[in-house]
Image (cartoon, rainbow, N blue to C red):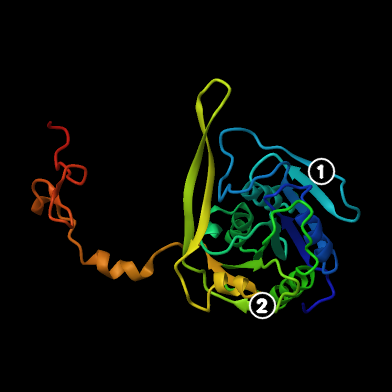
Amino acid sequence: MTDARKPTILVVNDDGITAPGIKVLLEEMQKIGDVTVVAPDSPQSGMGHAITIGKPLRIDEVHIYPGVKMYKCSGTPVDCVKLAVNKIFKGKAPDICVSGINHGLNNSINVLYSGTMSAAVEGAIEGIPSIGFSYDDFAYDANFGNCRPFVRAITEEVLKHGLQKGTLLNVNFPKVDQIKGVRVCRQGNAKWAEEFDERLDPYQRSYFWLTGVFVSTDHGEDTDVWALKNGYASMVPVQFDMTAHHAIPELNSWSFDISSKPGPIKTTEGKASEENSFDANPGLG
């Protein structure tokens, strides 16, 4: 920071405005700058980048922790960022947006489902340097003590150096006695092997609980999965441009001239596919 002005800091999350993780985050941010909290009025985990478009949004100032402006929002984590920028900061973006600290990891593929990370992504879309913080403990009384110094240090480094346009940070902390340090990583190749536990309600109708096991097929030692497993905090630079740039040359070699493709299209197995066929004149049938 090159001037004496305290940085303005937007704090958001997806676990809700009363979650212990956001309390830890805002306390650390108060040591750095002027904090404004805008968070959902109830838990919004797994919402991803959802926004509210079919019903009105409400935002109300609340007084939960001293010395910090706090607002609860009826919408999603992304709604919180949008309203903060447009209504609370009135178009003058804060110096940084920090999201979390989430109860549970958002490493690997989880970044796609995470409301915590989507709030940070929305901050980056608005041109705000943004960080998402997550901790490997779902417990309400989780001990975030080991995370505190790293949260502050990482935030101060971002304020000092900035982030490249279109880039944000996904930071995850392992649940260990002592975090070994921070590893800059790539996103590990892993996914959920999902199951749906089927049960019956009192009326004998089926309902389902989503369960599953997190499976990694990536054995690289440069991934967030490896870092967390080995006691390091992982830091992955994330971008919201989802273009698969490496696939563009191959796609440009394909032919999309429908006049040269009469009849059904052959699949890669050599079988005709009714689903993949198309009619150049769908009005005739």
Which label lies toward us, 1 or 2?
Answer: 2
> Residue 126: which numbered mark, if any?
none
Where's residue 84, x and y in %?
Answer: 71, 51
On screen, residue 70 versus residue 185, left or right, reads right
Q: Is residue 238 above or below residue 10?
A: below
Which kind of residue does numbered mark 1 sit on?
Glu
On screen, residue 78 versus residue 187, left or right, reads right
User: Which residue is drawn at the image coordinates 70% and 49% (left, top)?
Assistant: 15
Residue 77 appears in the rendering: yes
Which kind of residue does numbered mark 2 sit on?
Val
On screen, residue 243 versus residue 174, left or right, reads left
Residue 169 quadrant: bottom right
User: Which residue is drawn at the image coordinates 70% and 66% (left, top)?
Assistant: 175
User: Which residue is drawn at the image coordinates 68% and 67% (left, top)?
Assistant: 173
Residue 238 quadrant: bottom right
Residue 134 quadrant: bottom right
Where's residue 205, x and y in %?
Answer: 50, 24
> How far apart in space, not on screen, are marks 1 and 2 (Cα)?
36 Å
Instruction: Report helix, strand or loop for mark 1.
Output: strand
Where's residue 153, x and y in %?
Answer: 75, 75
User: Which residue is drawn at the image coordinates 14% and 38% (left, top)?
Assistant: 281
Instruction: Report helix, strand or loop for mark 2.
Output: strand
- Number of marks in the rendered image: 2
Where's residue 97, x and y in %?
Answer: 69, 61
Q: Is residue 179 above or below residue 198?
A: below
Q: Is residue 203 above or below residue 231?
A: above
Q: Which mark sits nearer the N-terminus, 1 or 2?
A: 1
Q: Residues within 10 Å of mark 1 (few under 14, many from 20)?
A: few
Judging by the rendered image, the residue that carries numbered circle 1 is 61
Judging by the rendered image, the residue that carries numbered circle 2 is 182
| Quadrant of the image containing the C terminus | top left
